[in-house]
Amino acid sequence: MTGTRDLVGYGGRPPAVAWPQGAAVAVSLVVNYEEGAELSVEDGDPVNERIGEVLSVIDPGRRDLGQEQIFAYGMRAGLWRFLDAFERHGRQVTFYMCGRAVERTPALAAEVARRGHEPACHGWRWRPVRGRSASSAAAARARIPAPCWPSSASSTAPTRSTTICPITIARCRVRRS
């Protein structure tokens, strides 16, 4: 690891920030739309996603029905509650959408866009990338559908936040009335 951690910060002298209209706080609302893109034995992964509302304790190679239901709730009920709340309060937000989640729920993704929210690419699958090296690029490419690679793809392995996936965006395009 290079560099030294900054444990001092502004040292008691924060910068003077003037927000528009005298606001004291700026809020950016972003919703992760990832359900269906997480690790799952049901989908052929060797292990299930371990991190969710609760930490999974199921042995590798066995389905974790509890974790699956927690993730499913987001699409089956949670997303609709978010959409309705944003509409009630007149807020437009950004949805970070994993391509695989959009592929599995195209009508829900279209509803996000229809209501005027911004669909933003969040990679194809929800995969950990920590510790990956450039030499693992071939393995990463094998896991991600070809349309999700930009034409000028480099030889380095992608991350879930930088992979460009036109499938995600194409599925979300709808005409707004």
Image: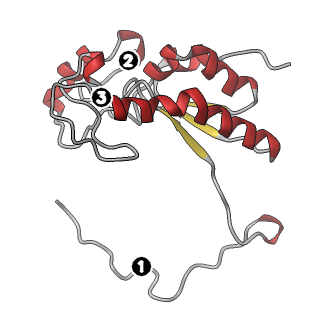
For badge 1, the amino acid type reads: Gly
Circle 3 packing at 10 Å, graded few (<14), some (14-19), many (20+), is: many
Q: Quadrant of residue 20?
A: bottom right
Decide which of tag 2 and tag 3 comes sooner along the chain: 3
Circle 1 packing at 10 Å, graded few (<14), some (14-19), many (20+), is: few
Residue 97 seen in the current view: no
Residue in the image at 75% along x and 30% along y: 116
Q: Which mark is residue 149?
A: 2
Dot 2: what SS? Answer: loop
Decide which of tag 1 and tag 3 comes sooner along the chain: 1
Q: Is residue 11 left or right of residue 118?
A: left
In front of the other: label 2 or label 3?
3
**Spot occupied by residue 23 in the image (x, y as percentages of width and height):** 76, 69
- In three-dimensional space, the C-alpha distance between marks 1 and 3, rounded to whole angstroms, equals 37 Å
Q: Quadrant of the C terminus?
A: top right
Question: On the image, numbered disc 3 is attached to which residue?
Answer: 39
Dot 3: what SS? Answer: loop
Nearer to us in this view, 14 or 88:
88
Question: On the image, numbered disc 1 is attached to which residue?
Answer: 9
Dot 1: what SS? Answer: loop
